[in-house]
Image (cartoon, coloured by chain):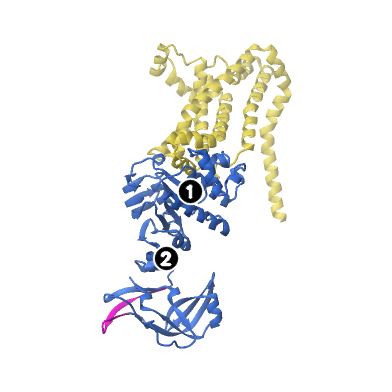
């Protein structure tokens, strides 16, 4: 008994240290610059524009990730096909490589000197240095998170529920729409929230592909290098507050989570 | 009508091999088999949820081998119900129904209409099974596939649900295939019994025939026959006698000489305290009681005959009257017609 208590106390102490390390810098940042950041929202037009740009591009990247990611996640969850392990490994790649490297790779693929970038440019679509570049960078680093979460969400819906729906007269698509989708919805939304949060916090890939127009993470870096810590702090605090929105949404979603089998 | 001819299917490493049986139109088929024998897989193949890898499946006269699940007109009820958890009980019942009034009638027959307001998650296992039954029948399927649909019900509700399913089966002429591992249920419900083990059909036919005339000793033991002996038949003075160790058992009919197995159901053996008077029973033995065990309403009495053990089944009343004890000497008889050779 005494020994197990000692283990519990040791675990609690180690956990507390880690939690403090994670929370303290953020709390310190918000405490130091939160009110100032809020006040800046009125006076700093560039910060306001940057916040709007970040939210919009992150939303666009999330929607694009969901559009392509949901079918891929469904395939990975429901179908055994040749190369499935390879696809899963490819999806892990953007999560493993350093994000500035991801930015360089995207620059090579979508820059004006590349075949794709050149073709897009001829169609009037410039990627580098535009919101499209920001969306591309965000999509690259965050879409795998959506696929991973959505795959889990689909896997949790028992395939026999779809089977019963089929025997009750549903076509495969109708069974998906009436049974699978509603039951996976919570997980899909949670995956979207995580994807959005990851897109909002991205810096490394964006700074290579589209330094301008500035998203909040780039703006904070820009203010820090150009004007020092005091100017960067309110921007950084605003970014933290923006990141709290998906975190709160995620907690609310997970509170009502129940297994998708009855 | 369900007709499977050399049906094959694969799920991971498990395979259904050469599944052949017929359940005539309007008949009640029962699939019996141990856990893991492929009973549920068979239902999923018939309902079109799992693809066939070979063979031919005919449902109500049409080739359903390549027919999608939603076009087969099959109602499937899983043991666990698999109700849609995001829908109410009423929405579950109405899910595939085309006529709400008819669906409500079915719900009433199973007492499920009283649960309409309840959340699916709050239902007991038995209630889920009843809702799943109502949901499958509310669509008025052409064929009904049941996977242990009464297993979670208490005895009185099980009997009522069984009666209701049987009544609907008769009223609609609904061809039904019912998976169970309960032999009593199989015997009482079925017109056709299909015995499945390790993904293969061991035997199929009328339940009474399958139970009384198992094709192999394995089937006999699987169906609960205690007295299965290996030996051989000889013909002496025109009469067939089966020999196994110390036992010489008279058998009826034109048995062919040679090695075989003899099966005697425990219920066919009569036990007495004193040597019985001459009777039509051709087989009479004397032995010693070595074991007495109560199994539900019956007593299983094991009798040793010069090293060979036979089991007799007695009702509790008979066992009480005989006051048998281990070590007692008893006499037992059975007719030659009670011996099944295979």
Picture quadrant where residue B236 is located:
bottom left
Residue B92, image x, y percentages: 54, 41
Up/down of A169 relative to B10, above or below: above
Given the current orientation, which residue lies at the most extreme front position?
B171
x 72%, y 18%: residue: A36
Position of residue A249 in the picture relative to residue B276 (left or right): right
Q: Residues within 10 Å of mark 1 (few under 14, many from 20)?
A: many
In front: label 1 or label 2: 1
User: Badge 1 sits on which subunit?
Assistant: B
Q: How many numbered discs sit on the rendered protein? A: 2
In front of the other: A237 or B295: B295
Position of residue B144 in the picture relative to residue A34 (left or right): left
In front of the other: A37 or B341: B341
Residue A62, image x, y percentages: 53, 25
Chain ID for blue: B
Based on the picture, tell me whether residue B249 belongs to the magenta stretch. Answer: no
Question: What secondary structure do most residues of the magenta stretch adopt?
Answer: strand
Position of residue A35 in the picture relative to residue B267 (left or right): right
Q: Which residues are magenta?
A: B227-241
x 48%, y 88%: residue: B274
Is there any visible trace of residue B4 in the rendered image?
Answer: yes
x 66%, y 38%: residue: A18
Colour of chain A as rendered:
yellow
Question: Which mark is drawn over residue B222?
Answer: 2
Element carrying mark 1: strand
Disc 1 to disc 2, how far (Cα)?
A: 26 Å
Up/down of B281 relative to A236, above or below: below
* Upstream in sequence: badge 1 or badge 2: 1
In front of the other: B164 or A181: B164
Question: Which mark is drawn over residue B77?
Answer: 1
């Amino acid at each position: 008994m005494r020994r197990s208590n000692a283990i519990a106390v040791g675990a609690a102490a180690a956990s507390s240290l880690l939690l403090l390390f994670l929370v303290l810098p953020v709390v310190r940042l918000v405490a130091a610059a939160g009110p100032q950041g809020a006040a800046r929202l009125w006076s700093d037009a560039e910060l306001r524009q940057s916040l709007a740009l970040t939210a919009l591009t992150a939303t666009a990247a999330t929607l694009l990730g969901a559009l392509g990611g949901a079918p891929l996640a469904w395939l990975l969850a429901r179908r055994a096909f040749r190369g499935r392990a390879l696809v899963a490994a490819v999806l892990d790649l953007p999560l493993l490589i350093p994000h500035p490297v991801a930015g360089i790779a995207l620059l090579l693929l979508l820059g004006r000197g590349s075949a794709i970038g050149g073709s897009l440019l001829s169609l009037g679509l410039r990627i580098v240095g535009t919101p499209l570049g920001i969306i591309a960078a965000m999509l690259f680093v965050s879409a795998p998170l959506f696929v991973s979460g959505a795959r889990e969400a689909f896997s949790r819906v028992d395939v026999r529920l779809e089977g019963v729906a089929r025997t009750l007269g549903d076509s495969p698509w109708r069974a998906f729409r009436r049974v699978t989708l509603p039951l996976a919805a919570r997980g899909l939304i949670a995956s979207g929230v995580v994807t959005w949060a990851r897109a909002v916090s991205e810096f490394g890939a964006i700074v290579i592909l589209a330094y301008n127009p500035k998203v909040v993470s780039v703006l904070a870096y820009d203010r820090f290098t150009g004007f020092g810590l005091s100017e960067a702090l309110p921007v950084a605090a605003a970014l933290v507050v923006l990141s709290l929105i998906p975190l709160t949404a995620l907690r609310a979603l997970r509170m009502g989570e129940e297994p998708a089998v009855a | 009508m369900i007709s499977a001819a050399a049906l094959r299917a694969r799920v991971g490493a498990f395979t259904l091999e050469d599944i052949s049986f017929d359940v005539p139109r309007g008949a009640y088929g029962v699939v019996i088999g141990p856990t893991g024998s492929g009973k549920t897989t068979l239902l999923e193949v018939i309902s079109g949820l799992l693809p066939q890898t070979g063979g031919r499946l005919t449902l109500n006269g049409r080739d359903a081998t390549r027919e999608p699940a939603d076009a087969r007109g099959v109602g499937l009820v899983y043991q666990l119900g698999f109700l849609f958890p995001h829908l109410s009980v009423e929405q579950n019942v109405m899910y595939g129904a085309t006529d709400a009034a008819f669906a409500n009638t079915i719900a009433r027959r199973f007492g499920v209409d009283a649960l309409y307001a309840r959340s699916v998650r709050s239902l007991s296992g038995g209630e889920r099974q009843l809702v799943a039954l109502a949901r499958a029948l509310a669509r008025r399927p052409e064929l009904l596939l049941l996977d242990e649909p009464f297993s979670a019900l208490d005895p009185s509700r099980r009997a009522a649900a069984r009666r209701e399913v049987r009544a609907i089966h008769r009223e609609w002429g609904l061809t039904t295939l019912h998976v169970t591992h309960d032999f009593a249920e199989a015997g009482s419900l079925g017109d056709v019994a299909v015995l499945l083990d390790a993904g293969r059909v061991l035997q199929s036919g009328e339940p009474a025939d399958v139970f009384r005339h198992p094709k192999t000793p394995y089937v006999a033991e699987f169906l609960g026959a205690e007295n299965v002996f290996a030996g051989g038949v000889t013909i002496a003075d025109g009469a067939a006698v089966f020999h196994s160790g110390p036992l010489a058992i008279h058998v009826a009919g034109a048995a062919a000489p040679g090695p075989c197995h003899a099966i005697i159901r425990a219920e066919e053996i009569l036990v007495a305290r004193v040597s019985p008077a001459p009777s039509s029973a051709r087989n009479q033995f004397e032995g010693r009681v070595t074991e007495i065990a109560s199994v539900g309403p019956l007593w299983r009495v094991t009798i040793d005959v010069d090293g060979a053990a036979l089991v007799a089944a007695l009702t509790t009343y008979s066992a009480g009257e005989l006051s048998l004890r281990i070590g007692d000497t008893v006499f037992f008889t059975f007719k030659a017609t009670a011996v099944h050779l295979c």
